[in-house]
Image (tube, grey):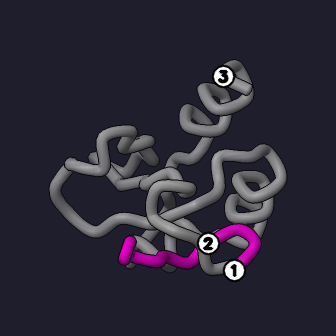
Amino acid sequence: MEPVRTCVGCRARAPRSALLRVVERDGVLVADEEAALPGRGAWVHDTHACVDTAIRRRAFGRALRVSGQLDTQTFQETHQRKG
């Protein structure tokens, strides 16, 4: 049975393979394509709607337990070019 995670954007539960893991590195939000980077991760559907919702709600900062400001601009720009 595959592990299930919750998307920080839409809050729907989904298999781990259907979600993108995101981590914080030096205050910057980074996509963890391999799901292998160390540290706490947040999971999000790889769609503009879920990513935008999570950023607007500041869900990444809460899920990653980051105190202070989290730079989401680079992640958002990379995600927009990708899709």
Residue 14 in the magenta stretch? The answer is: no
Residue sitting at the far right: 49
Mark identifier at residue 67: none
Identify the residue at horizontal 61%, vertical 71% (top origin). 7
The CA span between labels 3 and 2 is 20 Å
- Number of residues whose C-alpha sits closer than 10 Å to that of mark 3, classed few (under 14), some (14–19) or many (20 or more): few
In the rendered structure, does residue 3 fall within the stretch colored magenta? yes
| Residue 40 location, quadrant | bottom left
Q: Quadrant of residue 8?
A: bottom right
Q: Is residue 74 above or below residue 24?
A: above
| Viewer-side residue, 79 vs 62 | 79
Q: Earlier in the sequence, mark 3 or mark 1?
A: 1
Counting other residues with Cα less than 10 Å from the Cα at mark 2, is it few (<14), some (14-19), or many (20 or more)? Answer: many
SS state under label 3: helix
As displayed, is residue 22 above or below residue 34? Answer: below
Task: Please name the residue that numbered disc 2 is placed on.
Answer: 8
Q: Which residues are magenta?
A: 1-11
Location of mark 3 (residue): 82
Q: Specify which label sits upstream in the sequence, 3 or 2.
A: 2
Residue 38 placement (x, y as % from top left) = 16, 56
Q: Is residue 72 left or right of residue 23?
A: right
